[in-house]
Image (cartoon, rainbow, N blue to C red):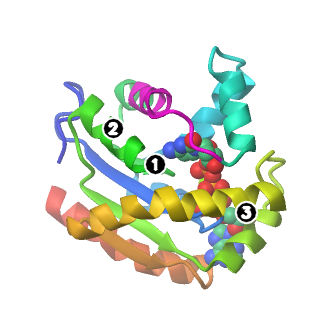
Amino acid sequence: MNGICPKHVDSVITFVLGGPGSGKGTQCARIVETFGFKHLSAGDLLRKEVVSATEYGTMILDTIREGKIVPSAVTVKLILREMESSDNHKFLIDGFPRSEENRIAFERITGSEPDFVLFFDCPEEEMVKRVLSRNQGRIDDNIDTIKKRLKVFEALNLPVVDHYERRGKLHRINAVGTEDEIFEQVRPVFAACEQTAA
Ligand SMILES: Nc1ncnc2c1ncn2[C@@H]1O[C@H](COP(=O)(O)OP(=O)(O)O)[C@@H](O)[C@H]1O
Ligand SMILES: Nc1ccn([C@H]2C[C@H](O)[C@@H](COP(=O)(O)OP(=O)(O)O)O2)c(=O)n1
Ligand SMILES: [Mg+2]
């Protein structure tokens, strides 16, 4: 349990990690409908800043186009704003942290760590195939950007996975198979969380 902010003294925080196209968003939708978590996609929050043409919009757009990671203070601020305005105290934070800088910024700003972390482990060729057939009109769903994103994933995201594995907080999910087969690996993790919270 986390006392992330006065409003949510008993909040549950889950980070959802995995490379581009590993199935984070898809599985988060299943977790939301089954276990009633609030889904916060860091990528979606950043894209909303671009669409709303806020002060960070252009920087975020350029960063996403290059497959790089937006400065953590921006992303953490967006996540925290959503958490503080939500009536739900169970949070599924999708696509975050994507670097040690992200992770440390979250801990420093919120004073909290996740209760547990999901990692969708997917081979690169499968991730590329899924991203290129995602058809969501995203500027980063192209072969050039996905190659850059995979390098960022390897260099910056995996150290975060190792960190939580060392702390015994990581649940590694085999992300190859049908959406149902993958969700059947996810379900017991959240069922156990419900037991603990009861
Ligand atoms: N198990 C799966 N098998 C095949 N395609 C999948 C699977 N899970 C998700 N997808 C598809 O792959 C693409 C990427 O999934 P998404 O959930 O957006 O991944 P992420 O959020 O990790 O980038 C989407 O088009 C989605 O419909
Ligand atoms: N913690 C994060 C999450 C996403 N971003 C940026 C960089 C990412 O390539 C894009 C897209 O993230 P998103 O999680 O939506 O991407 P996928 O669903 O994994 O394909 O947003 C970031 O800078 N920091
Ligand atoms: Mg996603």
Residue at the disc numbered 1 = 96
Quarter of the view holding residue 195: bottom left
Q: Which residues are magenta?
A: 68-81
- Where is residue 36? Give x, y as percent: 40, 52
Q: Earlier in the sequence, mark 2 or mark 3?
A: 2
- Asked if residue 25 shows in the view, the reply is no
Location of residue 123 (image quadrant): bottom right
Identity, as a three-letter code, of the amino acid under mark 2? Phe
Which label is found at residue 147?
3
Mark 1 or mark 2: whose residue is earlier in sequence: 1
Mark 2 element type = helix
Q: Which sits in the foreground, 132 or 85?
A: 132
Q: Identify the residue shown where x is 72% and y is 18%.
A: 53
Q: Mark 3 is on which residue type?
A: Lys
Left or right: where 120 falls relative to 196: right
* Visible residue check, residue 153: yes
What mark, if any, has residue 106 been given in the picture? 2
Q: Secondary structure at mark 3?
A: helix
